[in-house]
Image: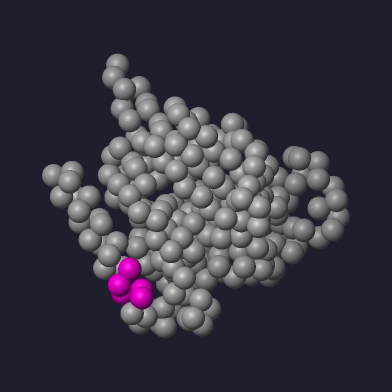
């Protein structure tokens, strides 16, 4: 794999102006996410996880540093990046099929529409029986499936997700986590997720980037290579793994240390 393939964040800082004074949200963040991997931004509340994700999306600009995706500078939003938010962002007046097709239509991508891309991703997220249903007729988890399918239908090089399952009940959240892993493995997607949940971070991520409390700095990079020896999507085996327990305890200690530092 080329060193340029994937996401690269180099020396990124972000300062906001608030009440006439400068407030630094992020300081000198450098990290890399190889193509085809799932990364998770984890850390205490207020550490700048969502701010960093928005800069990767091109929705905000760094005060210092650079962000590149597959060797190209990120300066603005682009079709090479797709974003899924925590709230259910489907268009209520459109059916599931028309929601998933929306991005392709506004971008004039007739080839993708004609090649069955929409139906492919509707099937991928398990909504083929609901293709002609409207969002208000769906559960929260199903509406989030629509958002994921709509984003993936544009074949982004990087899928960005800001606490996408945070509003769901635990059982639905687990189902959506498994669905996401199945889809990204099949599509070989590169994904960066913001999470506040340690179990979710370790379950989804190939690599977890732990940020310190405000101003956010990259305190530690944690790899989850132990999962390669476990059955895929076997949550019980995952939770019972000694490596999972060790890393969960380690991250809890990091969280505790950040809390003590803040105090």
Q: How many marks?
A: 0
Q: Which stretch appears magenta? A: 243-247
Q: Quadrant of residue 215?
A: top left
Quadrant location of the N terminus in the rendered image = bottom right
Q: Is residue 99 visible?
A: no
* Residue 90 or residue 1, whichever sits in front: 1
Dominant SS type (magenta): helix
Where is residue 194 shown, x and y percent of the image?
44, 52
Q: How is the image coloured?
A: one colour
**Rendered position, 75 above or below 162:** above
Q: Is residue 7 visible?
A: yes
**Rendered position, 111 above or below 59:** below
Q: Quadrant of residue 196?
A: bottom left
Where is residue 85 shown, x and y percent of the image?
50, 48
Is residue 215 part of the magenta span, yes or no?
A: no
Indicate left or right for 150 with 18 as reference: right
């Amino acid at each position: 794999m080329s060193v340029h393939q994937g996401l690269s964040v180099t020396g990124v800082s972000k300062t906001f102006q608030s009440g006439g004074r400068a407030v630094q949200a992020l300081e000198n963040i450098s990290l890399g996410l190889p193509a085809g991997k799932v990364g998770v931004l984890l850390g205490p509340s207020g550490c700048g996880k969502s701010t960093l994700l928005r800069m990767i999306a091109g929705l905000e600009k760094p005060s210092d540093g650079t962000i590149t995706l597959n060797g190209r500078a990120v300066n603005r939003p682009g079709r090479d990046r797709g974003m899924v938010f925590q709230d259910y962002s489907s268009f209520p007046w459109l059916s599931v099929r028309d929601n998933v097709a929306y991005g392709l239509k506004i971008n004039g991508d007739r080839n993708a529409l004609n090649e069955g891309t929409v139906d492919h991703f509707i099937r991928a997220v398990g909504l083929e029986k609901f293709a002609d249903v409207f969002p208000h007729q769906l559960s929260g988890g199903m509406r989030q499936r629509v958002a994921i399918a709509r984003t993936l239908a544009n074949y982004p090089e990087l899928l960005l997700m800001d606490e996408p399952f945070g509003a769901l009940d635990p059982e639905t959240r687990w189902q959506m986590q498994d669905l996401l892993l199945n889809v990204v493995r099949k599509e070989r997607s590169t994904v960066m997720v913001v999470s506040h949940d340690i179990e979710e971070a370790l379950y989804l991520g190939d690599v977890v980037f732990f940020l310190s409390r405000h101003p956010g700095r990259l305190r530690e990079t944690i790899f989850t290579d132990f999962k390669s020896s476990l059955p895929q999507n076997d949550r019980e085996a995952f939770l019972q793994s000694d490596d999972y327990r060790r890393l969960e305890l380690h991250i809890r200690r990091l969280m505790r240390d950040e809390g003590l530092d803040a105090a």
